[in-house]
Image (cartoon, rainbow, N blue to C red):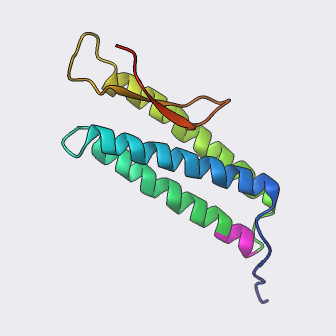
Amino acid sequence: MTETTRTEPYPPILRQEIRRASRLSHALSLFATRVGPSDACFEWICVRIDEVRARVGEVTRDWAESRLDAAVAAGRLRDYLRTLEESLHAFSRSSFVRGGDDTAPATAVELSPASPATSTRRASP
């Protein structure tokens, strides 16, 4: 049996999740530059950036090789990104929220189910 490889652009349902992954990866990259290599969370963030790229590559390759249809591929990315966003929330609460600590990062990555990783903003003093 020979495998066929799709050559058409990603369907909208899959493209939406790829864009969401791209926004999350970009937000993580921005966050990494703000915390810097000396921060304890830097390595965790960098690993997650690579992980997002790898996961998107794996799922889109499976779709392109007709092993997954677009809805299943999009669902796998959506589930993975949701889990990662929840982990990031938990990680950021435990690692970055320090009451009264002037050395805490002055940035926050906004992540919510309604607006995943779409912006970064300076935290209010």
Q: Position of residue 9 (x, y in %)?
A: 77, 69
Q: Position of residue 118 (x, y in %)?
A: 57, 38
Q: In this orientation, which residue lies closer to the viewer: 124 or 11? A: 124
Q: Position of residue 32 (x, y in %)?
A: 34, 44
Left or right position of 20 against 45: right
Task: Look at 39% across and 15% down and name the residue there.
Answer: 124
Q: Is residue 59 magenta?
A: no
Q: In this orientation, which residue lies closer to the viewer: 23 or 46? A: 23
Query: If the image is split into quadrants, where does the N terminus sit?
Result: bottom right
Left or right position of 49 against 117: left
Task: Look at 77% across and 79% down and name the residue there.
Answer: 7
Numbered label tally = 0
Most common secondary structure along the magenta stretch = helix
Q: Position of residue 17 (x, y in %)?
A: 69, 50
Q: In this orientation, which residue lies closer to the viewer: 87 or 23? A: 23
Which stretch did the figure color magenta? 61-65
